[in-house]
Image: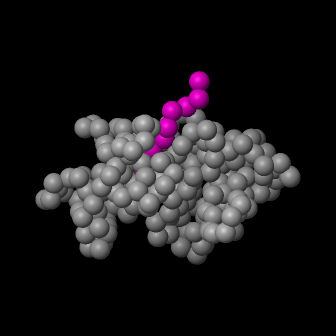
Amino acid sequence: MTMESVLLDAPQGITARLGWDPKLTVHDRRRMLARELVADQRGVDEKTVLVEREAPNQFGHHTHLIAMEGTEELPILISTASFRTATVVAISDPSIPVGLDIRDMHPDDATLHEMTRHSHLLEGSDTNALLAHWTKVQAVREADGRGVRVKADYVRLDPARHRGWVPDRRVYYEIADMSRDAWIITIAYGAFPH
């Protein structure tokens, strides 16, 4: 299986790729992109890298991916986001919280309604401003680790929209735009270890 993908301009210490293929499932796209990123980072053949779901330590559905080389689990955080036929995957040091969001530049009416309902932007904002705001909010929710358990309207962004946070935690996330082609892609990430 092959999939068209491109390397994204990610913040230092994070590597990310965007891939799209309507014939592949979202799970296949995530694993393929992660395997490609990990192999490139480690300088090994992709065939030597296995990407699978983390084994659950309790009942429930776990979506975290782990990378292995042989029988060794690699110390790499794999973050993913998908929208329709596109997927973005980022890898980083596991101590860095990372959140991703990807959206089509042309949202449908239902998506616009949801964004407007939960956005801090004033009604009447243009679609591009609303999309940019929404993807930043979603990326912060994902970096926070609680995802949809945090209401979108709880997320705060600084006036320049380069940093975001959830008020009940003392963690601030840098926000960067990695948009490409017809996709709005946003990454929120915590501080790098010193």
- The quarter of the rendered structure image containing the N terminus is bottom right
Q: Position of residue 36 (x, y in %)?
A: 68, 52
* Magenta-drawn stretch contains 61: no
Q: Position of residue 42 (x, y in %)?
A: 74, 41
Query: On the picture, is 93 further left or further right than 55?
Result: left
Q: Residue furthest left?
A: 124
Residue at left 30%, top 55%?
A: 153
| Magenta region | 186-194
Judge whether 34 appears above or below 14 on screen.
below
Q: Position of residue 176 (x, y in %)?
A: 41, 41
Query: On the picture, is 172 further left or further right than 125?
Result: right
Front residue of this view, candidates 31 and 58: 58
Front residue of this view, candidates 120 and 169: 169
Whether residue 157 is visible to the viewer of this picture, yes or no, is yes
Residue at left 34%, top 57%?
A: 152
- The quarter of the rendered structure image containing the C terminus is top right
Where is residue 43, by image quadrant? top right
Looking at the rendered structure, the number of numbered marks drawn on it comes to 0
Whether residue 99 is visible to the viewer of this picture, yes or no, is no
Colour style of the rendered protein structure = one colour
Front residue of this view, candidates 144 and 113: 144
Residue at left 33%, top 61%?
A: 105
Residue at left 49%, top 48%?
A: 143
Q: Position of residue 66 (x, y in %)?
A: 70, 54
Where is residue 47, by image quadrant? bottom right
Judge whether 65 appears above or below 140 on screen.
below
Q: Residue furthest right?
A: 71
Query: On the picture, is 68 further left or further right than 107?
Result: right
* Magenta-drawn stretch contains 188: yes
Where is residue 135, by image quadrant? bottom left
